[in-house]
Amino acid sequence: MTLAFQSASELTQKIQDKEISSRELTDYYIDRIERFDGKINAVPVHDFDTARNAADQADAEQAAGRSLGPLHGLPMTIKEAYDISHLPTTWGIENFAKNIAQTDSQVVKKFKAAGAHFIGKTNVPEGLADFQSYNSIYGTTNNPWDVRRTPGGSSGGSSAALAAGFCGLESGSDIGGSIRNPAHFCGVYGHKPTWGIVPSQGHALPGDVAPPDIAVVGPMARSAQDLALAMNIMAGPDPLNSPGWTLSLPDPGMTGLKDFKIAIWPDDPLSPVSSEMSGRVQEIGDRLAKLGATVSDKARPDIDVAMSRQTYFFMLNGVLGAHLPQEETAALTEKAAGYSSGNSSPGALTARSLTQSHQTWLAWNNRREILRMAWQEFFQDWDILICPQMATTAFKHDQSHFNGRRITFDNAEHPYFEQLLWSGHITVAYLPSTVFPTGPGTDGLPIGLQAVGAEFNDRKTIRFAELMAQEFGGFTPPPGFDD
């Protein structure tokens, strides 16, 4: 595989072995952005001079026999929603177009402390609230596999940058699949961590410092090994908790796929997916069974799926509306609940939900705890749950009003935000989920699936994705981006 598409682990090894300097690698990725990003628009915020200076410093440290850490000299990009000192953080919202970060986010600090530096920031949808990545500040990001299609959202620029070979590593964020659906759409890896184990401070709009309920930040990469590497760097307490607690994620201990007990959940009446998507889940399950893994297509967590949906949307609407200006709150709430517009679904919570009392929130939080306990019991018997991430492969750009959008598959139209539920069941219960590529669909576009595990079993879901790549193959570059 060409240099552009090698993993972060491979790239940092090349720097360590002096096969390439940090400055050479940084200039290489900058050149690729300048040559190829015109048709993708994945990296609209550039910081090339700062990156070159950091690369020169990394090379000087290496020449002096000193290492900056496990990512020594690695050029990265990162989602626009993370603060990097002296660069804009807008979340694609016009009201924040002139907001310049004064300090680095905690995740950026951790990556820099590990030896990485940043060549730019990647595009997002307005308010991070879409399966597409476009806004009035930076424009539209296209999918490297087909520029007529979305790369996903809200970490769409992140996934597109990785797939097109513009960086060595990335980091996104996720509340409704915003790491997972772009990873699926672009054929890369993404990990949604267990809630609370990666500090989110500095992934926020001005004035917002509290960790948001159910939302997480996490790594995106071209290999599962890179997800593990990044999680070792990112995970830990936030600054307020750091005096009092440490994190110790269990080591999975699995050496082969046959060691796993795997449940598969190909489809669900409340969250239908295309026959190709459900078929891919079943196909992966069958292949794993042939390798000796224990596989069941009947095992399910003992949850009320409708109640899980309701709880997720209550929490989602609260987070989306909590810290934005009033006009933005109304718009984003409409987006989140709009998929059920015109029906009486109990999941279609409206803006009135945002005004409910703390007592009401406690009642919903109790339902969430019931869900968490049910999932915990399920994962006493099963290591991994494999399920879809989205209903289809990457769909064509659609920038019409949210309430009018539809997703078509198997000759039927479906509400646009119906797809949130495969992410939502996992999100509301705080579970870790690793999206891994499984190869193309009949349209030639990537299909990624979720590998879900018990809370704090992040290393297990990532290890599973790593073993899947060893057995079945992993990231494949899209055509047209060779050097």
Image: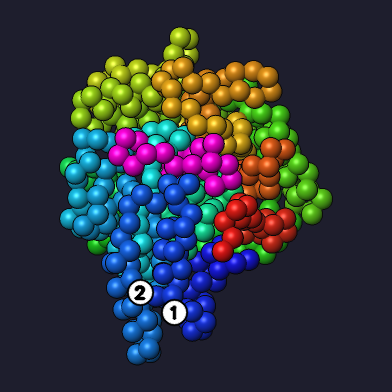
In the rendering, which numbered label is found on residue 150? none
Q: Mark 1 falls on what kind of element?
A: loop
Task: State the quadrant of the C terminus.
Answer: bottom right
Kindly give the residue lying farthest to the bottom in the view shown: 64
Categorize mark 2 by other alpha carbons within 10 Å: few (<14), some (14-19), many (20+).
many
Q: Is most of the magenta stretch helix, strand or loop? A: loop
Percent position of residue 373, x then y: 49, 37
Chain part drawn in magenta:
135-159
* Residue type pointed to by label 1: Ser
Q: Residue at x 57, y 20 (%)?
A: 414
Which residue is disc 1 drawn over? Answer: 21
From what the image shows, is residue 341 above or below residue 285?
A: above
Kindly give the residue lying farthest to the right in the view shown: 290
Which residue is disc 2 drawn over? Answer: 55
Categorize mark 1 by other alpha carbons within 10 Å: few (<14), some (14-19), many (20+).
many
Q: Give the distance between the C-alpha atoms of the residues marked 2 and 1, in whole angstroms.
A: 8 Å
